[in-house]
Image (spheres, rainbow, N blue to C red):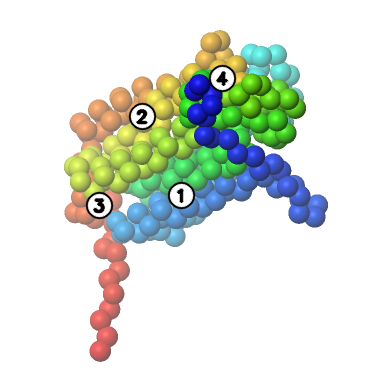
Amino acid sequence: MSALLATISYPPIPIFEIGPLRLSLHGLMAALGFLLGAMIATREIRRRGFDAVKFQSCLTWALIGALLGARYLTAPAQLMAGASFLQVLNPIGGNFSIMGGFIGGIAGGLFKARQYKLPAWPLLDAASFGLALGTVVGRVGDLAIVEHLGRATTAWFGYGIRPGYDVAPQHDALECTVAGPDGFCGIYHHVALYDLLGAAVLLGVLFFLSRKMKLHYGQLFAVWMGWYGLQRFLLDHLRYGMGDAVIGQYTWNQLTGLAAFVAAVILFWWLGRNKKIVSAEHDRDLYGALPPPTAVATG
């Protein structure tokens, strides 16, 4: 009965060709997510009076770090699975990890910020908005190509694969030519959708906390880090055995997410004891922020 109530079923949008180029909405939405995330973070930096031009230069390094991190965070799991060292070094082969992208992007951005002598904690707080929004937008690409499906489910909100659907290559084994009695090849947890919804709620929480609560410098970033880390740890229970890199009985993203959650709890506590409460006065006095420009009256 529950299978008949499944309403999430739509034809995937596969890779399409434009001349010699092969494009996928997965990559397109990931790039758009980074762009929109960078825009919202820059707006927050500018609102608080920090140097937005230097911050955007940091974002260029963050992009490079994100690409490297997304590819190579899964390297230990690949080696443990028997892959050769040359296979692990292949920049376009193997698995990619959003958690690795976050780690590499943050590291790359902070490296450049240190060269510019920009304050790390205000920048990370501003970046938390972009990280959450980028996840929301990027996951739209996963929905389009139907990637990151989880285990089979009888829940009414599962994704139903119909005969002829060309889902992401990771899930080729789930496709079929003849449907079952319920009209589907199978119904599976739509983990990318769950992740999108969780990140959207997180974005709202970040705005609420930043505008209504008295947080210490860096604590907003710690909230993002802890929330998303725990979210991935929980959601990837549904992903085990579906093609992601694994270590033992856990996916690599699960272990990374759990580590991020634990680190975020400790970081939130430490920041509360060692950093000032965020305010315009402290932005100016502690970190040298300038008042944002105001409109000049004419008449």
Residue corresponding to mark 1: 37
Q: Is residue 58 visible?
A: no
Q: Are marks 3 and 4 in contact (CB under 8 Å)?
A: no
**Dot 2 and dot 1 residues touching (CB under 8 Å):** no
The CA distance from mark 4 to mark 1 is 33 Å
- Amino acid carrying label 4: it is Ala
Question: Which residue is the site of mark 2?
Answer: 226
> Residue at horizontal 50%, vertical 21%?
1
Q: Determine if residue 146 is in view.
A: yes
Q: Which mark is residue 283?
A: 3
Mark 3, secondary structure of its residue:
helix
Q: Which residue is mark 4?
A: 152
Give the foreground label among 3 and 2: 2
Residues at discs 3 and 2 in contact (Cβ within 8 Å): no
Of callouts 3 and 1, the N-terminal one = 1
Q: Is residue 122 left or right of residue 106?
A: left
Residue 103, x across and y down, in percent: 49, 34
204 relative to 81, above or below: below
Q: Position of residue 196 (x, y in %)?
A: 46, 38
Q: Nearer the viewer, mark 4 or mark 1?
A: 4
- The amino acid sitting under disc 1 is Gly
